[in-house]
Image (tube, rainbow, N blue to C red):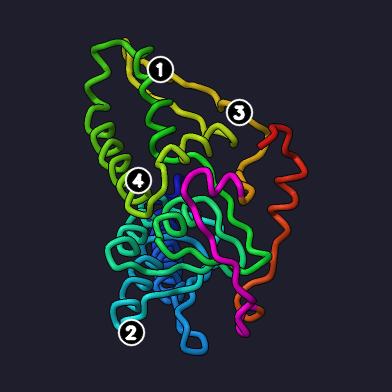
């Protein structure tokens, strides 16, 4: 006698579906409740990953309070969200103070675009390549792809070119030579660039492997290097609330210990 297992399978799929839905709801609720930009002792402080939620919180808080300054502690995140924050900073002449770490999108697109840059004495500010360097890498790769497949990437290149323009405008408006982004790329690791196309019914990948320009992920320029690119950073004492926001991870020291390329 053959037993019909369809009802049991249906119930199992239904249970799994409900479980997944609950997890999604829990995650989305947790994510939306995350506070990246907050008021601490009447100071606006951005603490954590750079993302669209944090971008919205920060801009809304700056607009609501009318403040022209905020503190930041971040290891980076979304370059797109960083660009949008940087655009708001440039348009509204917002001062930025690093009180802990400021890496990647934080350094490239939030800290640098500010005309009034400040940092506590032990702040860790780490740069790397940006849209300019990544786009150049992808252009060199595109030439290897058969011409009939190149058109499918046209839109993505147009978007990248707009981001490059914004990148250059943001830095130039702060009196910084935009070429510092390419310099940062030369001093750090590149990510892998790749394209995937279908040829004769098979998926084919074209890749440029990681370009090792040095053996560390972030570049921590010395003072004279900052000055070379038109960057002035005022050093300030620790604010009273600093210990409530961040503790140094020691990541800078780890990265510098692996550095082999002289600055």
Q: Quadrant of residue 193?
A: top left
Residue 176, position in %: x, y?
A: 41, 48
Mark 2 closeness class: few <14, some 14–19, many ≥20 residues within 10 Å: few
Mark 1 closeness class: few <14, some 14–19, many ≥20 residues within 10 Å: few
Residue 158, position in %: x, y?
A: 23, 34
Q: Quadrant of the C terminus?
A: top right
Q: Quadrant of residue 84?
A: bottom left
Q: Is residue 87 above or below residue 46?
A: above
The reply to whether dot 4 and dot 3 touch (C-beta < 8 Å) is no
Residue at image mark 3? 213
Alpha carbons under labels 4 and 2: distance apart: 27 Å
Residue at point 55% right, 48% down? 226
Residue 231 within the segment the image draws in magenta: yes
Residue at image mark 4? 167
Of the pair 120 and 203, the residue shown nearer to us: 120
Residue 226 within the segment the image draws in magenta: yes
Regarding residue 22, the answer to whether it shows in the image is no
Residue at point 38% right, 12% down? 144
Labels 2, 1: front one: 2
Q: Which residues are magenta?
A: 224-242
Left or right placement of residue 38 versus residue 152 in this view: right
Alpha carbons under labels 2 and 1: distance apart: 53 Å
Q: Secondary structure at mark 3?
A: loop
Label 2 or label 1, whichever comes before in sequence order: 2
Alpha carbons under labels 3 and 1: distance apart: 27 Å
Residue at image mark 2? 65
Left or right placement of residue 153 versus residue 86 in this view: left
Regarding residue 128, the answer to whether it shows in the image is yes
Q: Is residue 6 above or below residue 35?
A: above
Label 4 or label 1, whichever comes before in sequence order: 4
Alpha carbons under labels 4 and 1: distance apart: 32 Å
Alpha carbons under labels 4 and 3: distance apart: 22 Å
């Amino acid at each position: 006698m053959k037993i019909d297992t369809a009802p049991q399978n249906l119930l199992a799929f239904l249970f799994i579906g409900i479980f997944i839905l609950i997890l999604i709801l829990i995650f989305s609720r947790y994510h939306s409740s995350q506070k990246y930009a907050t008021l601490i002792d009447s100071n606006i402080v951005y603490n954590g990953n750079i993302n669209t939620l944090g971008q919205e919180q920060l801009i809304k808080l700056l607009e609501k309070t009318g403040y022209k300054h905020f503190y930041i502690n971040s290891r980076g995140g979304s370059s797109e969200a960083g660009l949008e924050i940087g655009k708001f900073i440039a348009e509204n002449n917002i001062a930025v103070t690093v009180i802990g770490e400021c890496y990647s999108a934080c350094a490239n697109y939030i800290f640098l675009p500010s005309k009034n840059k400040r940092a506590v004495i032990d702040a860790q500010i780490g740069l790397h390549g940006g849209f300019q360097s990544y786009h150049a890498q992808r252009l060199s790769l595109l030439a290897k792809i058969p011409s009939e497949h190149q058109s499918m990437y046209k839109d993505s290149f147009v978007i990248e070119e707009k981001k490059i323009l914004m990148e250059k405008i943001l830095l130039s408006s702060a009196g910084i030579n935009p070429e510092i982004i390419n310099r940062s790329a030369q001093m750090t690791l590149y990510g892998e660039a790749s394209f995937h196309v279908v040829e004769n019914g098979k998926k084919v990948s074209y890749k440029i492997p990681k370009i090792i320009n040095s053996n560390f992920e972030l570049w921590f320029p010395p003072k004279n290097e900052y000055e070379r690119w038109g960057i002035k950073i005022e050093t300030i004492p620790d604010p009273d609330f600093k210990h409530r926001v961040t503790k140094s991870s020691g990541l800078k020291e780890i990265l510098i210990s692996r550095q082999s390329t002289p600055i």
